[in-house]
Amino acid sequence: MSKNALITGITGQDGSYLTELLLSKGYHVHGIVRVSTNNRNNPNYLLLEKLRKRGEKIHLHSGDLSDSSRLTTLISAISPDEIYNLAAQSNVSFSFAEPKYTSDINAIGTLRILEAIRNLKFTSQTKLYHASTSELFGKAQESPQTETTPFYPRSPYAIAKLYSYWTVINYREAYDIFACNGILFNHESPRRGETFVTRKVTKALARIYFGLQDCLYLGNLNAKRDWGHARDYVEMQWLMLQQKFPDDYVIATGVQHSVRSFVEIAASELGLTIGWHGKDQTEVGIIEQIDSSLAQKCKIKPGQTIIRVDPQYYRPAEVENLLGNSQKAKNNLGWTPKTSFKNLVKEMIAHDLDQTRKDLLCKENGYET
Ligand code: NAP
Ligand code: G4F
């Protein structure tokens, strides 16, 4: 018989990849969708709808992580074998502006799900995966970070996620629920939200390439992250729930790049070489060279300043340096990331170039995009 999975956050980056993975494994995939969100503009939602219309076993339900009774009703009706709690206010920067809302969703939201499992007496039938984060390490106390590295959260987002991390462990120990934390380092893809730095960069570079904008404004160019591909990381989310015992795992590539280096590598995919001048808020990225064979339709001119720093993107407390060691996942789950950093950037640039080209074509022909 097919297994039932319930995904919160199904309309997000990870939700869409996880849905595809679970469908390929024969699951019935149930997802919670917020009615307050305008999903008509969300490509991940449109992808789910396309799969559903094609006859795939996707079932979408309205709901919100702030609503305990709706969550309990849904979990009771679906009786899921596995719940993947991916829903969150996932933007670290935004969490400084909205700390209370972020805590309600990212901390108490997880508690609401665990309480529903407990109150429905589903403790031995429903497994829970929780989307924890490398942001727990924050001002990292050692490098690389592992499952035993002390936590030092640096934002309302991370503090709320730390509450969830311990609640998952507490409910596992107190009520014997099969509940796991995936401590995931940054993972990206063409489906990444446009406010996160990688997607912001690939989208803007594609627009600059076609002459739709002149310059991209960024915050801290020195921040370093361990960036992997979301498609690889959702595989591990599923694997964690197929083990004999629940546990918590760091998931990372073990390779680190700065924001500045991400920009350089993304630009090189477009045949552009960037030179950096100035420091901190006055730093700029200027086009030094254009590879003529790669840049036939390029509207950029040598000497053009395409990157500037805008302090509005600085954070009140920054996480400067994250690098993970996922040896435990390698040993216990047999998991290793498949996509290299270079191929991740390549895929994102190719997608955003293609998207921008289509948008331009529609504009030229007078269609709305
Ligand atoms: P994402 O693209 O921002 O997706 C977040 C999802 O949560 C969306 O489907 C969103 O729905 C939903 N959501 C937000 N508030 C909600 C609410 N109040 N009730 C119900 N649903 C709500 O995030 P992601 O990159 O896929 O990440 C998935 C999870 O992993 C998140 O919990 C994130 O914090 C965590 N994480 C991500 C990374 C990463 O690098 N991507 C690393 C570590 C941990 P709408 O479409 O309606 O907005
Ligand atoms: O892409 P980011 O916004 O991701 P951040 O803050 O690392 O959070 C993401 O990864 C976490 C896992 O570690 C998840 F838990 C979380 O949900 C989210 O998916 O920023 C990355 C770095 C930061 O240091 C930021 O200060 O890039 C720096 N940055 C520099 N300029 C910028 C910008 N970030 C954004 N969003 N926009 C900029 O213009």
Image: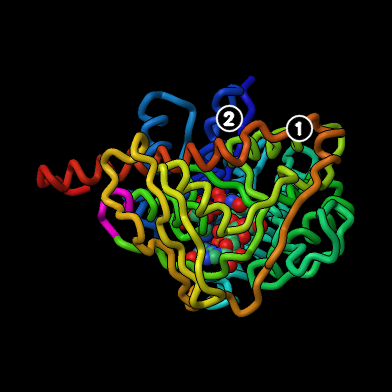
User: Disc 1 marks which amino acid?
Assistant: Trp
Q: Which element carries disc 1, helix, strand or loop? A: loop
Residue 265: give x, y in percent of width and height: 53, 47
User: Label 1, label 2: how many angstroms apart (C-alpha)?
Assistant: 15 Å
Q: Which residue is mark 2?
A: 21
Query: Residue 52, position in %: x, y?
Result: 41, 31
| Residue at the image position 36 percent from the left and 48 percent from the top | 206
Q: Which residues are magenta?
A: 207-213
Ligand 1 within 8 Å, label 1 CB: no
Where is residue 184 drawn, in percent x and y? 70, 49
209 in the magenta segment = yes
Residue 52 within the magenta-colored segment of the rendering? no
Going 76% across and 32% down the picture, which residue do you hit? 335
- The residue beneath circle 1 is 335
Residue occupying the far top of the picture: 1
Q: Nearer the viewer, residue 290 or 35?
A: 290
Compare residues 5 and 141 and report the one nearer the observer.
141
